[in-house]
Image (cartoon, rainbow, N blue to C red):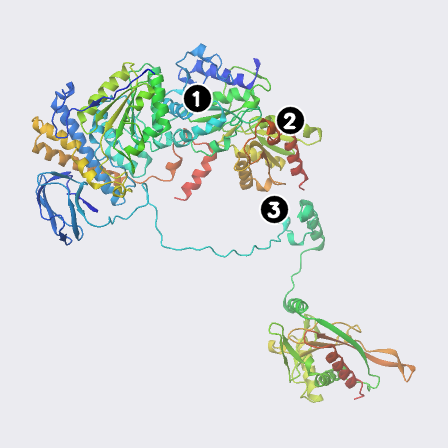
Amino acid sequence: MKIFKLPDLGEGLQEAEIVKWHVKVGEEIKADTPMVSVETAKAVVDIPAPYPGRIAKLYGKVGDIAHIGAPLVGFEGESDARDAGTVVGVVEVGQKVVSDAPAAPAPVTAGIKATPAVRALARKLNVDLAMVTPTGVDGLLTAADVQRAARILAETGPIEMIRGVRRSMAQNMELATAEVASATIMDDADIDSWPAGTHTMLRLIRALVAGCRAEPALNAWYDSEKIGRWVMKRIDIGIAVDTPDGLLVPVLRSCGERDATSLKSALEKLIADARARKVPPEELRANTITLSNYGSIAGRYASPVVLPPTVAILGAGRITKQVVVVDDRPAVHRMLPLSLTFDHRVVTGGEAGRFLNAVIADLQRAT
Amino acid sequence: MSVVARFEIRYSQFLDPRSKVVAPLPEFTRKTEDLAKLYRWMVLMRAYDAKAIALQRTGQINTFASLLGHEAINAGIASAMAKDDVFLMTYRENGVQLMRGVTLKELFLYWGGDERGSDYAGPRGDFPICITIAAHAAHAVGAAYAMKLRREPRAAVCALGDGATSKGDFYEAINAAGAWKLPVVFALTNNQWAISVPRAKQSAAQTLAQKAIAAGIECLQVDGNDVIAVRHAMDEALERARSGGGPTLIEMLTYRLSDHTTADDATRYRNPDEVAEAWKRDPIVRLRTYLLAAGAWNKAAEDALLKDCNEQVQAAAQAYLDTPPPTAKQMFDHLYAQLPAVLHKQRAAALGDD
Amino acid sequence: MAQITLVEAVNLALKREMERDPAVVVLGEDVGVDGGVFRATLGLIERFGPERVIDTPLAEALITGMAIGMAVEGLKPVAEIQFSGFGYTTIDQVVNHAGRMRHRTQGRLSCPLVLRMPCGAGIHAPEHHSESPEAMFAHVPGIRVVYPSSPRRAYGLLLAAIRDPDPVVFLEPTRLYRLFKEEVADDGEALPLDACHTAREGSDVTVAAWGAMVHESLAAADALAEQGVSAEVLDVETLKPLDLDTLLASVAKTGRCVIVTEAARTCSFASEIAAGLAEEGLLSLLAPVQRVTGYDVVVPLPRLERHYMPDKGRIVAAVKKTLAFG
C-alpha cells in the first residue's frame, strides 16, 4: 500500500480535525482530487490527492485529529518511495558500468640502481648516472662510483654534442647496422693497362654501371617490413664525399644514360658543391647504389656500410703497385682493390660475385 | 527445589489515552500552570522536529533523527532534573536538551554537521550526543561515581533506547551502578523499534525494566505517552539517587511515530495501520485534552503558542543558515588541549587547501 | 633515592600523584585489595581508601567508559586493564569517545584519563597475555600513546601522563616489570611527553625502539661496540604524537636506521617511522631502513616465544645489513 501522510499545513500547525471525507475505499481517483477537508486553528483546508490511484484505506473518521506526518490515506499498489539504501547520510547512486581492463603486461624495469643519496650526489657533481659503471652488489651504483666518474669527467672535459652532418651519419649508420645483413666480397682489378691521367672516379662510375647492367639486383631498394624490393631502372649513384663537416653522399643521377663528358662535369660540380655545402637536400637522397672511393685517402679493403633502402655499396681502395702473376711469372702491376658489401637479405652471393666480375671486367679495360 | 527470589514489575500511568485520570495525581500536578509549561515545551519540541525534517528535505541539514511521539518522555525527564545534574543522551532526546538550555540554533548546527553545535552555551556539563549505542551508559557510571566520591547531591541521567538494552555496555553499566549504589537514573525509551527490529525480536525478556533485577537495582515501567507518569517516576528516581538509595531503571513505553532517521523508510518493515493506531496515543493531544478539561488551556493560548513556536523555530533556522560554515581549521582545533607540534604541518597543509 | 623495578616505579608514581592531586583515582580489576595482579597498585587502597582505589567488576568496556565519565566530570582516573589482550575490548570506548570528547564538544568537555595496560611478550604466559597493541592505539586521533622502557622513565612518564589534559594510553612492558632495577628519585618530576629520548649516543647507525625492545637494543649496541660499530639507541617513548624530528636528526648523523618492535610486522609502528624517514629523511639514508619485528603470526605460546621475539642477535644482524649496503 502506498501511504500518503498529512503534509505540512504551514505556520507551525501540527494537526487538524477531519471534517469530511470526499472519497471512499475502493474509489479510483485522479491526481489533485480533493480527498478530505480538515479544519485547522485557522481554516478548513482541502487535501488533494498527490497522485492518481485506487483508495485502499482511510485513516481516521470525521471528528478525529489528523496529525502532520501521520498516515492519512492508503492507496493501492507498491510504495514508490525510492529506497535510499541507508539509514544515515546519502549513498550516491551511479549508472556507470565498469569492467576489469585486461591486465597490461608487466613493464620490464631495467633502471639504474642507486640510492637517493647517491643520485643526489650525482646531480651535485653533474655526473650522468648512465655513464657510470656500478661496482656495488647486484649492479648497485655506489657513491664511490659516482665520485670516480666525476674525477674522470674532470679530466676529459665536457662532452661534445654531435650535430649536423655528423649527427646524421651517426643516426643513419646505427639504423643501417641494426637492419642490414652485411656480407662483403673483396677482389682486385688489374688496371695496369690504364693510360696516364685516367680519371679513376669516372672509370669507377662506368664500371659500377656495368655491374648494375650485369646484375640489376644490386641496384635496388629493399623494404624490410613488406619483404619486397624495387629493382631500379635508373642508376643513381650516391658518391661518398669526405668534407670538413663530415661524410656527405650526394647523388649523381642517371649514370647509365650519360656520356663521359656529362658525367665528368656533373661529378666535378657535385664534389665542389658538396665541399661548399651547397648540395640541395633532395640531391642527398634517393640513390640506388653507393660508391665509396675511400682509397683516395687510405686503405685497401674495407667492409663499408650499406645504407638502406639501397642494397649494395662498392668500395674502392688505394691503387698500389703489387706483385702479381702474369702468364705464370711474377710482374709488377698497378692494382685497384675493390670491396663490395651487399645486403644478403635481398642479394645473393652469386649475384654479388657476378656483379663484381662485371665491375672488374670493365675496370680492366684500358679505356 | 525452593524459590530463592521472585520479581515483579510495576507499571505507572496517570492519564489514559483518552486523558482520563486513572490514578491519584502526584503533588506537582496541583499547579496546572506548571503542567501547561510542560505542554508548551512539548509543542515547541514538535515544531522544532518538523522544521528539522523540512530542513533535511531541502538539503540544509544532514541526516536527522526525529523525536516525534517522544515529547512526554523528553519533557518528563528534563523537568525532573536539576540544573547541575548531568544528562547523557543518545540522539533522540533533543527535547531534553532544549529544556536544559541548549538552543534551537545549536541543535540545527549539530544536525547540520558542525561540531560547534555540541559546545552548549547553556548546560556546560551535559554530555554530547552519543551515536554509538549504550557506550554512554558507562560514561554515566563514571560521572555518577565522581559525584558520589565528592559527596555532591547531584545525579547522572542516562537516556537509552530499547535496542541499547541488548548491548554489553548497558549490562556492564547497570551492574556497576548497582554494585556501587551510584546516583544514576537510566531513562529507557522503549519506542518499540530499533531501526527495523521490533521490540519482540530484540529480547525474550517480558519487560526491559526487569533487566534491572539482574543488576540488583530498582526499576519500573511507565506509560511514556503520559508526561505525568514520566515526570513522577523521574522525581522518585532522582530523589532515590540523591539520597544515596542508588540507581533506577525506568522503562518508558511509547512508539516511534517517525522513521528511524530521515534516510530510513519505515514502510519497508512496519505496518502503517500500526502507526496510525499509535498516533491515537499522541502525548501532546493527551495532555492538551486534560488541560482543556481542567480549564488550564484554551484555543487562544493554543493559537498564541503555535505562533510563538513557529517564530522561534523559523528564527533559529535562519540563524543557523546565516552561520558561516566552519573552516578546515575546526578539524584541528580542540583535538588536544594544545595541538602537538607534529600536527602543525598537517594543519598548515589542510588550511592551504581551503 | 631507591633502586627499584619498573613496576615499583609505576607504583611510586601513582602514590606520588594521588598524594598530590585528590582528583586522581585508580580503578580496574583486582587493583584494590590485591594491589593489582602485577602489584602495580600495591599499598594504594590502604593509603587512599576504597573510594579512590576501586575494585571494578570484570568489565573492560565499563572500566574504560567509566573512566571517560569520571574524567569528563573532573576526576583524573588512572584505569588499569589487566592484560593487553583484554585491551582490545577498550578500543571502542577509546576510539569512539575518549579521543573525541574534546573535539566533539569543541573544547567544552575534556577527557584527562590514563589507561594503563601491561603488554609485550616474554613472560611465558598463556594466550592473550603477550600482545603488542601500540600501533592500533597510535592510529587513533586525539589520544597519546606512551610506552616506557625503564623504571626511571616509567616513573616520570606516568606522572606526565596523569597530568596531561588529554587521554593517554600508557603501555607497560610486562617483561621488564622486574627484570632490572634503577635509581629513581621520588621527586614528583614529570618527564617530557611527545619527545624521543636518546638512550645511548652513537654515530654509525640509529636503532629506534620502545618498551622491552629498548633493553634488547642496548644489549645489541654493546655487542656492536665490541665490533667497532657505534650504535645510537633512541627510545621513542611517546609513539603518538611521534617526535620524528629527533629520529631525523639522528639518521642525518648516522645515515642508517634499524627500527625494533616486538609487534607483528604489518602496519607495526615501525612501519610508521620508516614511512616518516622515507618522506623526510631520504637524502640522509645510505641504506634502506630495516625493521626488526615480530612475524605476522599470532604471538605464540611459551614454547615458541623465543623464536618470535626480536632479540639482540636479530638487531645486530639488521644493523650489519645496513652497514653492508654500500
**Where residue B16 sits: x, y (%)?**
14, 28
Instruction: Tell me if B157 is positioned left or right of A286 in this view.
Output: left
Residue A246, by quadrant, is: bottom right
**Where residue B257 sits: x, y (%)?**
22, 37
Question: Residue B103: which numbered mark, if any?
Answer: none
Residue A260, by quadrant, is: bottom right
Q: Chain of mark 1?
A: C
Q: Chain of mark 2?
A: C
Up the image or down, A175 lies above or below A65; here it is below
Q: Which residue is mark 3?
A: A120
Q: Nearer the viewer, residue A192 or A243?
A: A192
Alpha carbon distance from label 2 to label 3: 35 Å
Question: Residue C79: which numbered mark, if any?
Answer: 1
Q: Secondary structure at mark 3?
A: helix
Q: Nearer the viewer, residue C248 or B291?
A: B291
Sequence-earlier tag: 1 or 2: 1
Q: Which residue is mark 2?
A: C219
Q: Secondary structure at mark 1?
A: strand
State which mark lies toward you, 2 or 3: 2
